[in-house]
Amino acid sequence: MIRFCSLLLLLASPAVADLRGTISVVDGDTIHVGSATVRLHGIDAPEQDQTCEDRQGRTWPCGAFVSERVSLRYDGERAICNVVDVDQYGRNVAKCYVDQRDIADDIVAEGWAEAYRRYSMDYDLTEKGAQVRGVGIWSGTMQSPSAFRAEQRGQTTSGRCIIKGNISASGMIYHMPHNRDYAATRINEARGERWFCSEAEARAAGWRAARN
């Protein structure tokens, strides 16, 4: 029985890894581990050319900032990774560890990426903590990376625009997929509410970003 329990603990440990090697950072959520390309499981960081807005409405290069911070933290470190999937681009999707610390969890905690709830809820609470502290990308407003990528491709992830322009007692407010009340918000076009394809479009129409 003792040997059986020891085996289970060993299998659960990140020390039993599919990939091991030195990290070279590609961007906020993608790294090379040795010669393998790894997409970190369960998180989504802003794209390299993506911009965000601070609390004063000023644009800043959040994608480049995140890539730089992740590079400073992890370039040259030794990682061990457990592969959970292979994505459509042939990249290993994995949970990776440096000194037994989950890289993705630390990145989300610093406010350098959002929890990618479409694929995992592992970092949900970590992201909420970063939002409360207002660190990194949560120091202002950010279009979700998935929406940004879809917009760059000339479409949205669901085949339509996904930013919700809601009218309430608080005024005309638009909700992004990462906002707290996004799922609960219903759009009634008969009341003048509408969908937007980008934050710039929403702001130009007179809507302001949700604060939560």
Image (tube, rainbow, N blue to C red):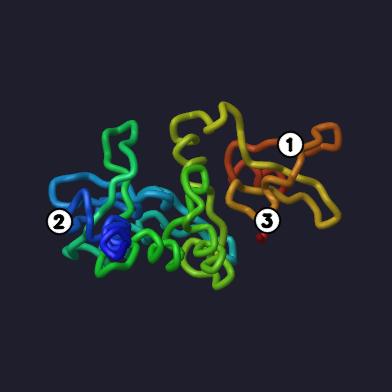
Q: Label 3: how many residues lie within 10 Å, few (<14), some (14-19) or many (20+)?
A: some
Residue at horizontal 66 percent and vertical 55 percent from the top: 180
Place residue 166 in its image quadrant: top right
Crowding near the residue tagged with mark 1, few <14, some 14–19, many ≥20 C-alpha atoms within 10 Å: some
Of labels 2 and 1, earlier in sequence is 2
Do we see residue 75 in this rendering?
Answer: yes
Amino acid marked by disc 1: Arg
- Judge depth for marks 2 and 3 and give the one in front: 2
Q: Residues within 10 Å of mark 2 (few under 14, many from 20)?
A: some
Q: How many marks?
A: 3
Question: Which residue ends up furthest to the top in the rendered image?
Answer: 159
Q: Nearer the viewer, residue 3 or 168?
A: 3
Question: SS of the residue at dot 1?
Answer: strand
Question: Which residue is at a point 46% across and 53% down the rendered structure image?
Answer: 51
Q: Is residue 162 left or right of residue 45?
A: right
Query: Which of the two discs, 2 and 3, labels the residue nearer the N terminus?
Result: 2
- Horizontal and vertical percent position of residue 152: 45, 35
Q: Which residue is mark 2?
A: 21
What residue did someone put label 1 on? Answer: 194
Q: CA–CA distance between discs 3 and 1?
A: 15 Å
**Left of 13 or right of it: where is 211?**
right
Q: Which mark is residue 210?
A: 3
Asked if residue 36 is positioned above or below residue 99 in the image, the reply reads above
- Residue type indicated by callout 2: Gly
Name the amino acid, label 3: Ala
x then y, percent, for residue 76: 16, 64
What's the CA distance linking mark 2 and mark 3?
Answer: 42 Å
Residue 74 is situated, as x and y percent measured from the top left of the image, at 25, 64
Say whether marks 3 and 1 touch (CB < 8 Å): no
